[in-house]
Image: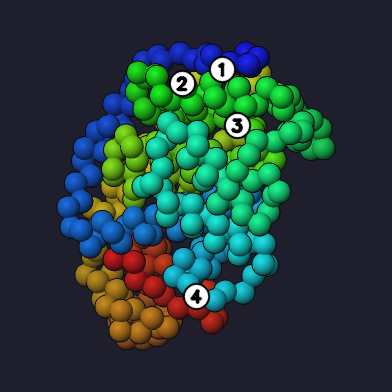
Amino acid sequence: MKLLDKIEPVFNIDNEVRDWISKIDSKLDYMQITDKQKRNYMVSKSKVRSIHSSLSIEANSLPLFAVENISNDKPVLGKMNEVQEVKNAIEAYNHMNQYDYTSEKDFLSAHQIMMKYFEDDNGGYRNHGEGIKKDNKIVYVAPESILVPQLMKSLFELLKNSDLNLLILSCIFHYYFVAVHPFSDGNGRMARLWVTLMLISYNKNFEFVPIEEEIYINQEEYYNSIEQCHINSNANVFIKFMLKVIDAALEKIIKSTSFVMSDTQNKIYELIVNNRFITQNEIVELLGISIRTVKRNFKILIDNNIIERVGSNKKGYWEVLK
């Protein structure tokens, strides 16, 4: 990876990469959700899941239901700084349709929102050195701060002028942005926000695909792929990782939107609609089936995003998602 004062990406588009792109495009074509109400609901849910996952990668401990409550202006219990991180991210994601992914000015404006109240230099590039530690050992040293403005200008010129497939370009931007590490804080969450913006520009269906969640699930591989690219001096490993993540996220959405409930699952669903505080043991009594059958069907409903648990096992409740 050559980083002087201009970014010249090093990567290779081989048959494996082409196959990933073809699979992703096929899934995007398959996702025909025309119901406006359903689409808006999915976009809203995806945004909450994206924000929760992106901040969880940065060690924010607030659970998913707390992020959703904050997005709905409901009070939550939590550390003030973590609540503020969520509020900032919600505001930044809500501005998404106002941003041009090729605009460095928009990018800095988004960072100013994302890091509001946290850094004195939010909305501006760092003026000090940065490095990445692993097990208390420095494994990567970012470019000197004096080079950052020109490197970032170069990166946005690439976005404006490149004729690369936008899927590939989003991966390249993500990796080289992380390599430059231009901000004092918020680099990871800004990379993921901007990649989401680029993907939505590629295909509107990405509005209801929480890519950040899939990155969070594969967090260790995410960081390892970045580290491997630093060693290899090219972006190949990270490009393939991200395409795999995008494909997996699309696959989950397709499965959840095409899922058909069984008779037992429909009955459980109706009981939850009528009483969101109902317990699994109560369902056993009402339906006359075993607790094992109830638990198995609950797992299927949860895995397919039909229902989700809000709060603790004792004091929480079931929320119907579809």
Q: Disc 2 and disc 4: Cα gap in Å?
A: 41 Å
Q: Disc 3 and disc 1: Cα gap in Å?
A: 12 Å
Q: Earlier in the sequence, mark 4 or mark 1?
A: 1
- Residue closer to the observer: 231 or 258: 231
Q: Which residue is mark 3?
A: 178
Q: Are marks 2 and 3 in contact (CB under 8 Å)?
A: no
Q: Are marks 1 and 2 in contact (CB under 8 Å)?
A: yes
Q: Earlier in the sequence, mark 1 or mark 2?
A: 1
Q: Amino acid at mark 1?
A: Ile
Q: Are marks 4 and 1 in contact (CB under 8 Å)?
A: no
Q: Which residue is mark 2?
A: 158
Element at badge 1? loop
Q: Earlier in the sequence, mark 4 or mark 3?
A: 4
Give the label on residue 107, or none.
none
Q: Amino acid at mark 3?
A: Val
Element at badge 4? loop
Q: Residue at x 40, y 14 (%)?
A: 14
Q: Is residue 248 above or below residue 161?
A: below
Q: Disc 1 and disc 2: Cα gap in Å?
A: 8 Å
Q: Earlier in the sequence, mark 2 or mark 4?
A: 4
| Horizontal relation, residue 75 to residue 43: left or right | right
Q: Amino acid at mark 2?
A: Leu
Give the label on residue 74, or none.
4
Q: Earlier in the sequence, mark 2 or mark 3?
A: 2
Q: Residue at x 21, y 41 (%)?
A: 30
Element at badge 2? helix
Circle count: 4
Q: Disc 4 and disc 3: Cα gap in Å?
A: 34 Å
